[in-house]
């Protein structure tokens, strides 16, 4: 099946008891057994729930994967992957990560004896310099947040396969509509479903998609044992959101391109980060591995200190000043004080996350209203 058909139908059958076309919200924690162990495949909703199961099958299909696991947040999904590791293991990852991932790696898992190398992965060859017999996982994000660096998934996958290391890709920014890391050789795809997949800024959720059955069993064991699994109502909301994922992404990309082109020549804009520009340092890789360039754009403001930057981000009327991204509504964010505040200043500076950087999540409103809002806010 093609993407649009999977978004609407994958994992979902008419309800066997009533014929309901929409997957029911199975709001139950437990399931009747006719005699101990004799059940219909469901025992307790931390481990399995039919609404969540339908969602997981849909999520897997979107990433061309066999297995999907839904978590109660993106961080819950990341946490489960990290729990595959043991003390002494090493992880190679990017130096421009989602702030919460950086915080989890350095403040939680580093305390359990897991060692992280934060590298500029825009040249994949650097991985070879850090791989050793303890390296068990490569964790990448592309496009990165907030500076839209592009990492060559296929090139990293070639190294990870040669060295027998797991490769996990945080595919949140691209969404499965624009990029499918498993097709490029990754072992695990992670999503903050909260963002584009959910798409309506009303649910916090995460997911893992993968093909290897042994690995799926290990991750399911962690998921069921540690318990960061979402409830049926949230699972239903996401199933509903996914039905328009392809339509929303198309509109995000169209609006994103127009906003990026508008900002590129704006006198108030210094640097602009968007992988669709031919002068983006890894544009050719983006073009190779993504189907379009998305609606996430960051810019630095010319001659703007913190005060002027605050004034500008507070003066939008259509864009909302808020954390998060990927919803139908446009958002503006100030990474240094909002999404990336948990990263030390020295690390932020290295990644270009500076005081006058602002990040836009371009929504699917009318483009004329978005451009007019940018015009007045930057005036
Ligand atoms: C939001 C986000 C996460 C974390 O997901 P939550 O659902 O907020 O826990 C991880 N990675 C990226 C790239 C994100 O944008």
Image (tube, rainbow, N blue to C red):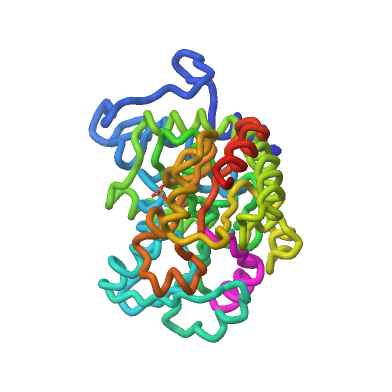
Q: Position of residue 307 (x, y in %)?
A: 42, 56
- Residue 261's place in the image compared with 104, above or below, is above
Q: Residue furthest top?
A: 18
How many marks the image carries: the answer is 0
Quadrant in which the N terminus is drawn: top right
The stretch of residues the image draws in magenta is 145-163
The residue nearer to you, when weighing 313 against 48, is 313
Asked if one can make out residue 145 in the rendered structure from this viewpoint, the answer is no
Taking the spot 61% from the left edge, 46% from the top edge, the residue there is 295
Taking the spot 55% from the left edge, 58% from the top edge, the residue there is 301
Queried whether the magenta region covers residue 154, the answer comes back as yes
Q: Position of residue 304 (x, y in %)?
A: 51, 60
- Residue 108's place in the image compared with 262, above or below, is below
| Quarter of the image where one finds residue 339 | bottom left
| Quarter of the image where one finds residue 126 | bottom right
Left or right: 47, with 282 as reference point: left
Taking the spot 51% from the left edge, 21% from the top edge, the residue there is 22
The residue nearer to you, when weighing 30 against 339, is 339
């Amino acid at each position: 099946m093609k993407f649009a058909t999977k978004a609407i139908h994958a994992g979902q059958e008419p309800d066997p008891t009533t014929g309901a076309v929409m997957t029911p919200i199975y709001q139950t924690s437990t399931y009747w057994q006719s005699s101990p162990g004799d059940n219909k495949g469901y025992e307790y909703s931390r481990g399995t729930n039919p609404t969540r199961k339908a969602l997981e099958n849909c999520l897997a299909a979107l990433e061309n994967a066999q297995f999907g696991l839904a978590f109660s947040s993106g961080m819950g999904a990341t946490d489960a992957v990290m729990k595959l590791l043991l003390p002494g293991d090493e992880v190679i990852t990017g130096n421009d990560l989602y702030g919460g991932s950086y915080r989890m790696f350095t403040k939680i898992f580093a305390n359990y004896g897991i060692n992280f190398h934060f590298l500029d992965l825009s040249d994949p060859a650097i991985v070879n310099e850090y791989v050793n017999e303890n390296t068990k996982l490569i964790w990448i994000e592309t496009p990165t947040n907030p500076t839209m660096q592009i990492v060559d998934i296929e090139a990293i996958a070639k190294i990870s396969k040669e060295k027998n290391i797991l490769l996990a890709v945080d595919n949140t920014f691209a969404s499965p509509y624009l990029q499918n890391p498993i097709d490029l050789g990754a072992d695990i795809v992670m999503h903050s479903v909260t963002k584009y997949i959910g798409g309506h800024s009303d649910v916090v959720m995460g997911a893992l998609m993968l093909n290897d059955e042994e690995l799926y069993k290990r991750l399911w064991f962690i998921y069921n044992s540690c318990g960061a699994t979402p409830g049926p109502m949230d699972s239903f909301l996401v199933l509903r959101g996914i039905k328009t994922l392809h339509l929303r992404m198309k509109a995000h990309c169209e609006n994103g391109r127009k906003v990026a082109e508008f900002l590129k020549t704006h006198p108030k804009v210094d640097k602009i980060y968007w992988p669709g520009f031919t002068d983006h340092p890894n544009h050719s890789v983006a073009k190779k591995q993504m189907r379009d360039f998305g609606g996430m754009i960051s810019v630095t403001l010319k001659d703007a200190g913190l005060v002027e930057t605050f004034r500008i981000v507070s003066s939008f009327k259509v864009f909302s000043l808020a954390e998060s991204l990927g919803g139908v509504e446009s958002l503006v964010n100030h990474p240094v004080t909002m999404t990336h505040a948990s990263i030390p200043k020295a690390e932020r500076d290295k990644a270009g996350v500076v005081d006058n950087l602002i990040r836009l999540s371009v929504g699917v409103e009318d483009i004329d209203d978005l451009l007019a809002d940018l015009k007045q806010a930057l005036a």
